[in-house]
Amino acid sequence: MKIYNFAAGPAMLPKEVMLKAQEEFVNFQGSGSGVMELSHRGKYFQPVIDHAEANIRELLGLSDDFVVMFIQGGASMQFAMIPMNLLNGGTADYVDSGVWGAKAAKEAKLYGTANIAASSKESKYDHIPAQSEWKLTPGAAYLHITSNNTVAGTQYQTLPEAPAGVPLIADMSSDIMSRVFDANKFGLFYAGAQKNLGPSGVALVVMKKELAERTSDKVPTMLRYSTYIENGSMFNTPPTFAIYMLGLVTDWVKAKGGVAAMEEINNAKAAKLYAFLDDSSFFKSPVAKADRSRMNVVFRTPSDELDAKFVAEAKAAGLTDLKGHRLVGGCRASIYNAMPMEGVEALVEFMKKFELENK
Ligand SMILES: *Cc1c(COP(=O)(O)O)cnc(C)c1O
């Protein structure tokens, strides 16, 4: 039976990438060793990390003003590293559009003032707060947003701009490389790799080089951005296998036609699933239409019991990991770059059948 994995993260990777990694698993480029067995200081690994960085620069159209860093600790460590390096007792604005953004703001409070510029928490994060309602701090140290809310299933359809002189920072963990965006508008953006870029174990952090100058001397070496910049992300042993996989995934994105091609496929996949949800009198999407995520499609049946039955029967039919996040319940289909259109079609067919049998 063909399996389609709809997990939110770690999530499915492109089949071609998995097969390529398998092919090289025990013998990387004739070295006689697998990538994870090779020294990060040896002759094989430097080209691997350089290649991953070059792919990212090309795919995201990064100018030399930006540095590309590979950092362990996931997106969650960036919640802390950002204020540790860039806040210094000042005030930063946070848009609270989901549980991850709220966690990011919580860490910032340890290093300064985190002003919640706007929040949709009271309506269970069912929409993104309208920009016209944001209460921004004049001269803020930065403005932090979450481009795609993985748990609630909302996404900025157009990424906002920060006021002049205020660096815009975005947690893009669950939608990086899923659509074209202008990197130049950002001071920093970051993503845990395990949704759209590779396996867990590494976060991609892209930052305007000049921001590194803000860091105080009191920040520990391993938590300073400058340490990663000065040492090419290899001050200590980096997560070599995760970085290698990130290189393979970005090779795959390039072969598919780049980020614009990904966006086109992602739009078609999401449109297919939302069109079905809009037609259905059984399944419902709980989020504002204007803010629907093209990566994490959240939906519900008429009851918690039917949600559970749906998730179990879908799994038996080869459509796995459709359970909603433990904080919100319901169902969620994560359809990142690696999910093919066929997977979404199979899901919609199954949903139709389930609806008929359970209405
Ligand atoms: C998954 C996720 C995180 C947490 O990532 P970790 O790498 O587990 O720390 C943070 N933000 C968003 C938007 C996410 O989707």
Image: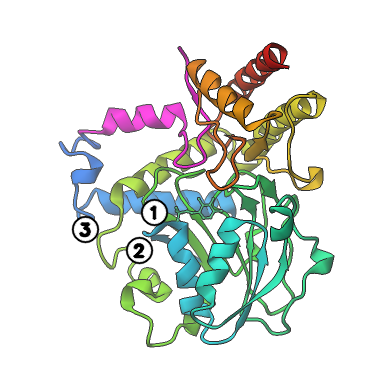
Contact check, label 1 and label 3, Cβ < 8 Å:
no
**Residue identifier under label 3:** 41
Q: Give the numbered dot on residue 148.
A: none
Q: Quadrant of residue 168?
A: bottom right
What crowding class fits label 1: few (fewer than 14 Cα within 10 Å), some (14-19), or many (20 or more)? many
Is the residue 292 above or below the residue 204 in the image?
above
Q: Quadrant of residue 245?
A: top left
Left/right placement of residue 211 relative to residue 28 reads: right
**Residue closer to the observer: 247 or 306:** 306
Q: Secondary structure at mark 2?
A: loop
Q: Residue at x 66, y 63 (%)?
A: 96
CA gap between label 2 and label 3 equals 12 Å
Q: Which residues are magenta?
A: 1-26
Contact check, label 2 and label 3, Cβ < 8 Å:
no
The residue type indicated by label 2 comes to: Ser
If you read the primary sequence from the N terminus, does the residue marked by circle 2 or circle 3 appear first?
3
Q: Position of residue 216 (x, y in %)?
A: 43, 87
Q: Is residue 7 magenta?
A: yes
**Residue identifier under label 2:** 233
Q: Give the numbered dot on residue 202.
A: 1
Q: Nearer the viewer, mark 2 or mark 3?
A: 2
The residue type indicated by label 3 comes to: Arg
Q: Secondary structure at mark 1?
A: loop
